[in-house]
Amino acid sequence: MRKKYIFQWSLLWFMLVKITVAQSPEWENYWFQLKQLPVDSVKELRLDGMRLHEFPEVLLEYREVTKISLDNNYLVALPVELSQFTKLEKLSLRSNLLSGNEVNLRPFKNLKIIDLGSNRFSKSLKIRTSKRLQKLSLYGMGLQKVQFQGRLPKEIDLSSSRLNELSWGLFRKPRVEVLVLHSNYLTTLPQGVSKLRHLRKLVLGNNHFESIPAEMARMRRLESLMFYKNKLTHLPDFVWTMHALQEIDVHHNRIYELPHGIGALTQLSELYLANNCLISLPDSLGKLSQLRYLYLENNELEALPSSFSELGSLQRLSLLGNRFLVYPAALYQMPWLHELDLSENDIESFPTDFKHWKQLRLLLLHENACKNGMTCMLELMRLEQNLTNQEIRLVY
């Protein structure tokens, strides 16, 4: 008898919760507004944070929908009825209660992008992909092994995991172009990653690498090399043979030297070296004719190489927090800069004639070591008056 009462009370509680969720103010308000629109005009369903335990069936009549967002709800499984939206291209289900060791995306014939991050899947997960899938997000779940059945998407986000293996069918040719493995506690590349020969962008930031893995030398198509917030002390020679590189991001490491070989990367447009231990820069840096962004904050630099003024495409330059005692001579010859940050150095005086700096938008000079504080302040005020571009922002 006691068990019977417990069962009845449990059933009643479940029904009350379900009713409460189904009639949550967020859902009721959204549904009221949605009903005012012609069915065929609705292209997107935004159901985030509505405390849903299941997908509302009343929405299935909106067959023209191409985007559905169901973030921050209480769904425990991927709603199969969503496959009835035959034009669905983008689906987001992050931060729900999805679980299990397998996800089947094959019923979603036209799906291109899906976000399944921050759910409760098993550490070993099997993904059955659909043919048109281009981007898959599986971050924030501590996944250790991911096995693909079907065509791999071009972009995969597995950040905040503990990945040690990525696998796919024996006769499949993986054409992954972007792989995000940020915050995975990695010291070596997970099994399978070195076989992704079509990679353009590999994000390995915020891990525990002490060196860049040698097997990456075979990734000849790589355009973005991202090892920020690791424990690197140097960059290996094979990096300078990766001629497709357009971006290198190694900020917050322990790199003490930038090798002469960097001059071979003639396609490089972005270089992030902030928060390292650099005391000098190689003269070959001037060969980087395509370089647009250069960030060198918080190093130990005291001078720039003579070739620095040859960086004719450079737009943004940050030298914040270094050890410059004088204004770098090379900068006098670089009026094409858009942004220049020389703050937090030990520079005693600055040039005041910036009239020919037609592209300048931001100039940061604060916290330097002017000998005479008042004289320096007046000098900088004159500098501000001489700047012809009205949009510029000077901070001193």
Image (tube, rainbow, N blue to C red):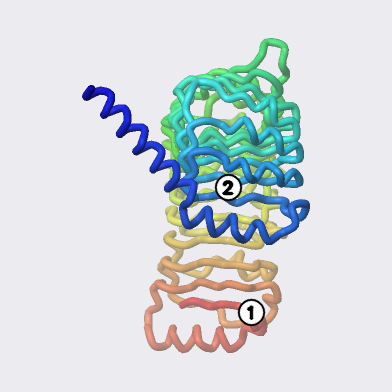
Q: On residue 282, which mark appears? A: 2
Relative depth, front residue between 122 and 248: 122
- Vertical position of residue 80 compared to residue 74: above or below: above
The three-letter code of the residue at mark 1 reads: Glu
Relative depth, front residue between 118 and 394: 118
Q: Residue at x 43, y 30 (%)?
A: 142
Relative depth, front residue between 207 and 85: 85
Q: Residue at x 59, y 49 (%)?
A: 271
Q: Secondary structure at mark 2?
A: loop
- Residue 153, picture quadrant: top right
Q: Is residue 362 left or right of residue 36?
A: left
**First reached walking from the N terminus: tag 2 or tag 1:** 2
Q: Position of residue 112 (x, y in %)?
A: 71, 37
Q: Is residue 32 left or right of residue 86?
A: left
Q: Residue at x 42, y 36 (%)?
A: 231
Q: Position of residue 84 (x, y in %)?
A: 71, 35
Q: Residues within 10 Å of mark 1 (few under 14, many from 20)?
A: few
Q: Secondary structure at mark 1?
A: loop
- Vertical position of residue 138 compared to residue 146: above or below: below
